[in-house]
Image (cartoon, grey):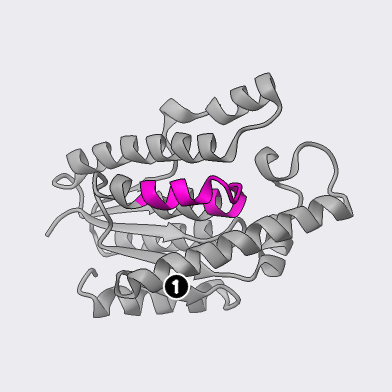
């Protein structure tokens, strides 16, 4: 069957980018067709424009913006499924849920919990989601000085900014794991502390066991 959808999830600096590239290279050597999706050009710069205007984004508004982006991606996926063998996605619906729950105020969290199940019904869902389980401290080392303004703002990496990054990523990691527990069979969890090659080998074997490769 064409159009296997493989989503990669994980906190910032988890190692997703490397694993996506290695999987794409492997698929290419096997003479399968594929496409890698990361974000959507229609939403490029939108968050930055809001930040420039208001200097902040309400977490629930950011969640809705993220879901709008992923819904647009979902619609494009439905059109591409019959055209390629594999669709590889760098972050999808789980990202919006995990990071929004990590950032959102406690007063709004019940609203988010009510909205999520309804929204997920209208998305094209993946065949499998690969979660790179990387501790925040390891991710921080990998990120170096490349941080997202929404998390750390501009400027040099101070001790306070570093603590903020770690706190944010730890909460997101916890939320990812809560999501996975609900439908564990739909996920492949890989230890992000392993080497790139070790992670890749585990991924390939796991995909073969699920008859995706």
For residue 91, say whether it is visible.
no
- Write down the quadrant of residue 85 in the picture: bottom left
Residue 150 to residue 8: above or below: above
- Write down the quadrant of residue 179 in the picture: bottom left
Is residue 42 covered in magenta?
Answer: no
Locate residue 77, reporting x and y percent: 25, 43
Locate residue 87, reporting x and y percent: 29, 51
Element on which disc 1 rests: helix
Which residue shows up at 72% across the image and 54% down it? 165
Nearest to the observer: residue 38 or residue 35: 38
**Residue picked out by circle 1:** 200
Which residue shows up at 24% across the image and 75% down it? 210
Which residue shows up at 52% across the image and 50% down it? 109
Segment colored magenta: 100-116
For residue 196, say whether it is visible.
yes
Main SS of the magenta part reads helix
């Amino acid at each position: 069957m064409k159009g296997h959808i493989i989503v990669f999830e994980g906190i910032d600096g988890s190692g997703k980018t490397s694993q996506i590239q290695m999987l794409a290279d492997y698929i290419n050597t096997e003479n399968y067709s594929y496409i890698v999706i990361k974000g959507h050009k229609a939403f490029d710069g939108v968050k930055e424009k809001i930040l420039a205007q208001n200097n902040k984004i309400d977490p629930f508004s950011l969640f809705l913006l993220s879901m709008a982006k992923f819904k647009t991606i979902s619609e494009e996926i439905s059109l591409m499924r019959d055209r390629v063998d594999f669709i590889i996605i760098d972050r999808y619906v789980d990202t919006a849920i995990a990071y929004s729950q990590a950032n959102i105020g406690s007063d709004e969290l019940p609203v988010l919990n009510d909205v999520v199940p309804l929204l997920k019904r209208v998305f094209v869902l993946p065949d499998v989601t690969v979660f790179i389980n990387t501790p925040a401290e390891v991710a921080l080392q990998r990120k170096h000085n490349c941080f997202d303004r929404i998390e750390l703002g501009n400027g040099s990496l101070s001790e306070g900014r570093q603590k903020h990054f770690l706190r944010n990523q730890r909460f997101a990691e916890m939320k990812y794991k809560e999501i996975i527990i609900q439908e564990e069979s739909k996920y492949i969890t890989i230890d992000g502390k392993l080497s790139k090659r070790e992670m890749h080998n585990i991924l390939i074997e796991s995909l073969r066991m699920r008859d995706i490769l």
